[in-house]
Amino acid sequence: MTVMIPAWIDGELQPVEKLDAHVRGLRHKAISVFVMRGDQVLIQQRAMGKYHTPGLWANTCCTHPDWNEPAQTCATRRLSEELGITGLTLTHRDRLEYRADVGGGLIEHEVVEVFTADAPADLTLRLNPQEVMATRWVTLHDLHADIARTPDLYTPWLKIYLADYADAIFGHADAAS
């Protein structure tokens, strides 16, 4: 199945095949979600079958919206598809941009709509094994410390989010790091 994502070519937004956008390093739309439970964030370990960064830890979920799909609709859809999470209220935090080499000759150059959501203590997860191999709750402080100790276990974008955009994403919740 060919997945078309919104990417900019010569300053114009066009549908582009997802893998082609990454091979060419085209600037494209994306979403990222951070589900919080108090001072903890839910992170996921990407499935080994993912075409880039398999087995690495990332934020709660992320993807590219379908052509003409609103960012919040995409974020809600992806929480359900990857983790079986439904019913959370998403809060738009910011629009961020980053460019990162994700290995295998692929580049993520994303314009990302970032959302957060507060989870209840009894949040139920149903992992899609094609997308996610594990999850864990971790404080932002401990996540910063673990990334400093073992950076190769984390996706480039999660490291960028925490290093460059933590205040925009988490606000005062990140003050402990």
Image (cartoon, rainbow, N blue to C red):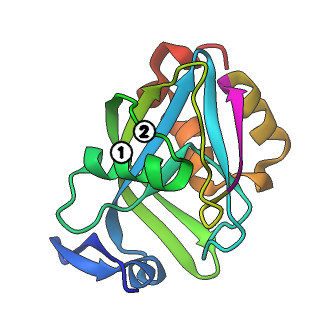
Q: Nearer the viewer, residue 11 or 158?
A: 158
Residue identified by numbered label 2: 86
Q: Is residue 75 above or below residue 15?
A: above
Which amino acid, mark 1?
Answer: Thr
* Residue at image point 47% right, 56% down: 81
Please identify the quarter of the rendering in which residue 129 is found.
bottom right
Left or right of 81, for residue 53: right
Which amino acid, mark 2?
Answer: Thr
Left or right of 138, for residue 102: left
Task: Tell me where the magenta segment starts and ends, as one range.
Answer: 133-140
Q: Is residue 21 above or below residue 63?
A: below
Q: Nearer the viewer, mark 2 or mark 1?
A: 2
| Residue 137 part of the magenta segment | yes
Magenta stretch, main secondary structure, is strand
Please identify the quarter of the rendering in which residue 144 is found.
top right
* Residue at image point 35% right, 32% down: 90
Tell me where residue 148 appears, x and y as whole percent: 78, 39
* Residue at image point 51% right, 49% down: 61
